[in-house]
Amino acid sequence: MSGALKIVPSTSEDAEAFIIQSFKDSAPRVFGMAMAPARFFVFEIDKGDIITKTEDFIDHKASVYHWVAFSAEKEVSAIRNGAAFDCLTKTEDVSSTTKTIEQSYILWGDKDPKEEAGWLELRAARIGTLHVPKPVGEKPKNAHVVLQAREYVAFGEFGNAYISGQRLMGFGWIEAEAEDLKAEDLHACD
């Protein structure tokens, strides 16, 4: 059980500034993703600056149409709508409780990624390279990097349960099973 998901909508002319401002007094590790038509970037917010391992982030920043930043405490997203951005801030309302499910989504790429200056380089054939901040904690043997999330369960009028929302929380490690599929095995339409 955790607090219920609380969502606060807003708008902003500058999504990057809105996200940085939203996390100015937040946890030490704040991660994010930025989607542009030609690129996908993962970043970390450090002392009010967006840090990314990808060198051409500055070239694509103006074309980013979807920003999302997240920490253990909250998630902030901004989606372009004309000249402005529609923004959502997701936190937990500790005054009420709800059933939650902790999720870990395995990121594609090598089980033992190359590490450089606190960033991991995840690679998969025919997909490419993704740089992500190194998760905190000891890396288990044969570990995959995972995106951690919390899903919030609600109950309908007739007692049926459903996922009413989700909040991204960070990156972590998960130990791989011996029979794990490789990223190349997951392509149905090559």
Image (cartoon, helix red, strand yellow):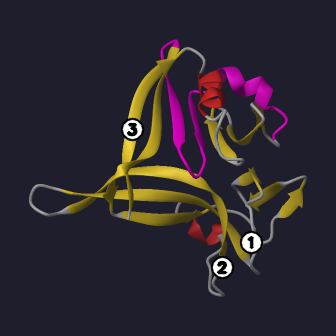
Residue drawn where x is 74% and y is 72% of the image: 111
Residue type of the residue flagged with mark 1? Lys
Q: Position of residue 45 (x, y in %)?
A: 72, 38
Residue type of the residue flagged with mark 2? Ala
Asked whether residue 65 is drawn in magenta, I would say: yes
Confirm or deny contact between disc 1 and disc 2 (CB under 8 A).
yes
Which region shows up in magenta? Answer: 54-83
Report helix, strand or loop for mark 1: loop
Asked whether residue 64 is drawn in magenta, I would say: yes
Above or below for 154 versus 42: below
Structural crowding at the residue carrying mark 3, measured as other residues with C-alpha within 10 Å and reported as few (<14), some (14–19) or many (≥20) = some
| Residue denoted by label 3 | 7
Identify the mark nearer the N-term, 3 or 2.
3
Residue drawn where x is 85% and y is 35% of the image: 55
Residue type of the residue flagged with mark 3? Ile
Q: Is residue 39 shown to the viewer in this render? A: yes
Q: Position of residue 150 (x, y in %)?
A: 46, 58
Confirm or deny contact between disc 3 and disc 2 (CB under 8 A).
no
Q: Position of residue 85 (x, y in %)?
A: 50, 21
Above or below for 42 versus 118: above
Identify the mark nearer the N-term, 3 or 1.
3
Residue drawn where x is 80% and y is 57% of the image: 120
- Return the residue nearer the eye: 130 or 5: 5
Q: Position of residue 165 (x, y in %)?
A: 37, 50
| Residue denoted by label 1 | 111
Residue drawn where x is 90% and y is 52% of the image: 117
Structural crowding at the residue carrying mark 2, measured as other residues with C-alpha within 10 Å and reported as few (<14), some (14–19) or many (≥20) = some
| Residue denoted by label 2 | 176
Q: Quadrant of residue 156?
A: bottom left
Above or below for 106 versus 44: below
